Image (cartoon, rainbow, N blue to C red):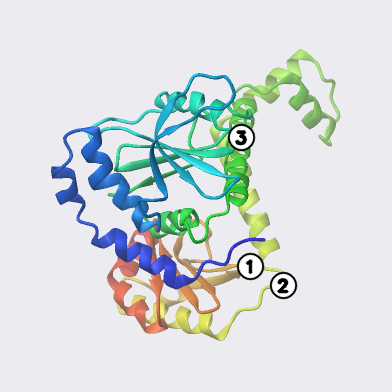
Amino acid sequence: MEVNIPKQAISQLKKALDNFKINDAIELCTNEAQTRKFLIEPFFLMLNYVSNDLIPEYNADFGDRISQKIDYAILLNKKDTILVEAKKYSSKLTDKEAGQLNGYFNNTKNSKIAILTNGIEYRFYSDVVEPNIIDNKPFYTFNIINYSENDIESLIKFDKRYIKVIDIVKTAQEVVFVESFENAFFKELVAPSKDLLKIIHRNMTFATKFNEENIGKMINLVNSSFLKCLYDKKVQLESLSNSQGVITTELEIQAYHTIRTLLIQNKKIPKERVSYRDFKGFFNISIDDNSKKVICKLVFNGAKMKIFIGDNEYNLEHIDDLLKYKTELTNRTLLLIE
């Protein structure tokens, strides 16, 4: 059962991170011990792990194996242990260094999560691909200097009060699965295999022989322009599909009219070109109802309201908060109508 994390807890974590005097802490860090004291331990304290929860120089051994000590272990319960390997603040983290955690994983049978950190960057690893062997890449990374609201919403899941290792491991599995699928799919796009081409050829309405000549033609067709064309068709298809069964709320219409009114105050923006399209889960305001010219995306989920303008994401307390983003909305619209 998924843990219900209160919004207040997320807000409190954000406040703690925002108020943390990171520059003062960094100035005190000249070695690994100071990095632990002034950066790493305060970070875990923000996640409600007190000093008794962080066991330093933990012996990661069992059976007849030689004892190996890891910088910290967090004993969540009798079943789960999180291992933490600390590096000096100035150290540059690489995934190769995560290999050092393999020995600890092998010797700590109850560990499914390991963290590699230099006090600024926190890399979270698991053993999804092969049991007791650290994955080559982290499934989640948090940077205490550069983070978004989405990062905080992910980080809160590691809070002592809410952490469920089984759910986190499932998330890690999903990340690895998606990445593996992307890599395999990309490999096929770069150099299509005969097996893939044979399936496509079988589904073509124009009947031809599956010979070397036609295989060559098919391979030559798989280029960036062709894939862009397919992408546009997919977007259009999803647009039609997502529009079915959608209920446009009064609040969404109110937001649309508010944004439209803000935009047309600029004489270069014709009011008839500003339109909207409602989808399942979000509401787009665009130029000419063009999916490539989205001015902003609104996500209204109960009392939670967000606006996405390009790569920027903002929370809204009230519809009137849209007024704060008049300049950004106008500038983006002017770029899209050119």
178, 21: nearer the viewer: 21
Badge 3 is on which residue?
128
* Residue in view at x 39 percent, y 51 percent: 52
* Residue in view at x 62 percent, y 41 percent: 173
Distance CA(mark 3)–CA(mark 1) = 32 Å
The answer to whether residue 267 is visible is: no
124, 217: nearer the viewer: 124
Badge 2 is on which residue?
245
Q: Circle 1 sits in a helix, a strand or a loop, which is it? A: loop
Badge 1 is on which residue?
280
Residue 91 horizontal/vertical position (percent): 26, 30
Residue 294 horizontal/vertical position (percent): 46, 62
User: Mark 2 and 1 residues: CB-CB less than 8 Å, in contact?
Assistant: yes
Amino acid type assigned to the residue bearing label 2 in the image:
Gly
Distance CA(mark 2)–CA(mark 1) = 8 Å
Badge 1 crowding class, 10 Å Cα cut-off, few under 14, some 14 to 19, many 20 or more, is some
Amino acid type assigned to the residue bearing label 3 in the image:
Val
Amino acid type assigned to the residue bearing label 1 in the image:
Lys
Name the N-terminal-most of marks 2 and 1. Answer: 2
Name the N-terminal-most of marks 2 and 3. Answer: 3
Residue 199 horizontal/vertical position (percent): 80, 29
Q: Along the horizontal axis of the image, is 144 left or right of 31?
A: right
